[in-house]
Image: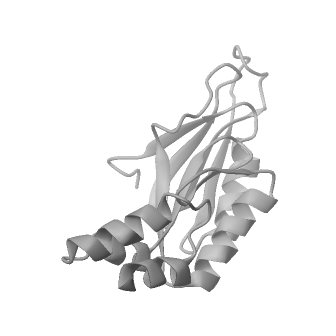
Amino acid sequence: MVSKNTICLWYDGTALEAATFYAKTFPDSAVGAVYRAPGDYPAGKQGNVLTVEFTVMGIPCLGLNGGSGVPHTDAFSFQVATDDQAETDRLWNAIVDHGGQTSACGWCKDRWGLSWQITPRALLAAITDPDAAAAKRAFEAMMTMTKIDIAAIEAARRG
């Protein structure tokens, strides 16, 4: 059954490679059907992989090999809530060490230019602390980080 809402992500011929990486990296992720082009199209030839159905942490996605000239932007990102530093490190490192790049405040990009927010639940709790001073300290600590360091966030929160 086709999902009522599916995220379509544009790739330049690498949709299957990206979907396979996501399926190996993130829990509750899988590669589904792979469809080949029934005829030539502007970005490829008959028989090339045209679309790939996959899920990322249970979210239905469609990878479209639409060709060059349509890059991913920070206007779209996957936000992944992590439970501890080990999970944060594992996911962050998988993305960055597989050709990705670091950014600020827990954001990174995969090798295809797709943005990811690797966000520990502890960070969300700290920056929404009812104690405004504690929340501000945690927020200011986060603003200095690339990958989130939970121990440093908690230390800042405590003051």
Q: Is residue 71 above or below residue 108?
A: above
* Location of the N terminus (image quadrant): bottom left
Q: Disc count in the image?
A: 0
Residue reaching furthest to the front = 159
Residue 58 in view of the camera: no
In the drawing, does residue 27 fall left or right of residue 39?
left
The residue shown at (35%, 76%) is 126
Residue reaching furthest to the left = 130
Question: Camera-side residue: 151 or 72?
Answer: 151
Q: How is the image coloured?
A: one colour
The x and y percentages for residue 90 are 68, 75
Question: Camera-side residue: 127 or 77?
Answer: 127
The x and y percentages for residue 7 are 45, 44
The x and y percentages for residue 154 are 44, 83
The residue shown at (42%, 73%) is 123
The residue shown at (73%, 66%) is 94
Question: Camera-side residue: 17 or 79?
Answer: 79
The x and y percentages for residue 45 are 79, 22
* Location of the C terminus (image quadrant): bottom left
In the drawing, does residue 143 fall left or right of residue 64?
left
In the drawing, does residue 58 fall left or right of residue 124?
right
Residue 120 in view of the camera: yes
